[in-house]
Amino acid sequence: MPNPGKRPPITSHVLDCGVGRPAADLLVVLEQKVANQWQEIGRDKTNSDGRCPKLLSVDHKLQPGIYRCTFDTAGYYAASGGTCFYPEVTIAFEIVNVNEHYHIPLLLNQYGYSTYRGS
């Protein structure tokens, strides 16, 4: 049975710096590289706080390796009648210690983005 206080091993949070608030309803796809092929292991849309609470379950067991999150920025901006320069943002990262938590934040605007390893 999942522990309600426990968080998934990989989480994400998207903030739209162009409007100064969380990016709600933005599709995020999580993949793992297996034998030089990308395999989808999770997908979710950001909630009103810009977080993806269902990207992975709290019980998901990570394996060491290369992962990536792809953010559908074109879909996000199109939903509000806007456009953007980067139609998607892909952030690849490596997991070595499967016992750590990995947080992938995205700071976004229509013409740029930034990321870092969050906590």
Image: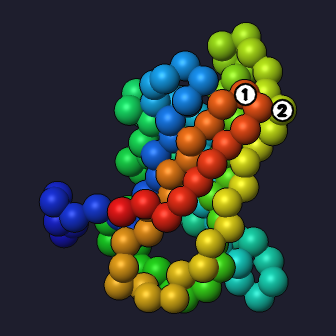
Identified at 66% across, 13% down, the residue is: 80
User: How far is the residue under mark 1 from the one under mark 2?
Assistant: 6 Å
Counting residues from the start of the chain, the first of labels 1 and 2 encountered is 2
Residue at 77%, 88% in the rendered image: 35
Residue placed under numbered mark 2 in the picture:
85
Residue 95 placement: quadrant? bottom right
Disc 1 and disc 2 in contact, CB within 8 angstroms = yes
Residue drawn at (60%, 79%) of the image: 94
Residue at the disc numbered 1: 110
Q: What element does badge 2 sit on?
A: loop
Residue nearest the observer in this picture, 99 or 106: 106
Q: Nearer the viewer, residue 98 or 117?
A: 117
Q: In this view, does 34 lie above or below 6?
A: below
Q: How crowded is mark 2: few (under 14 residues within 10 Å), some or many (20 or more)?
A: few
Label 1 residue SS: loop
Q: Is residue 79 visible?
A: yes
Q: How many marks on residues? A: 2
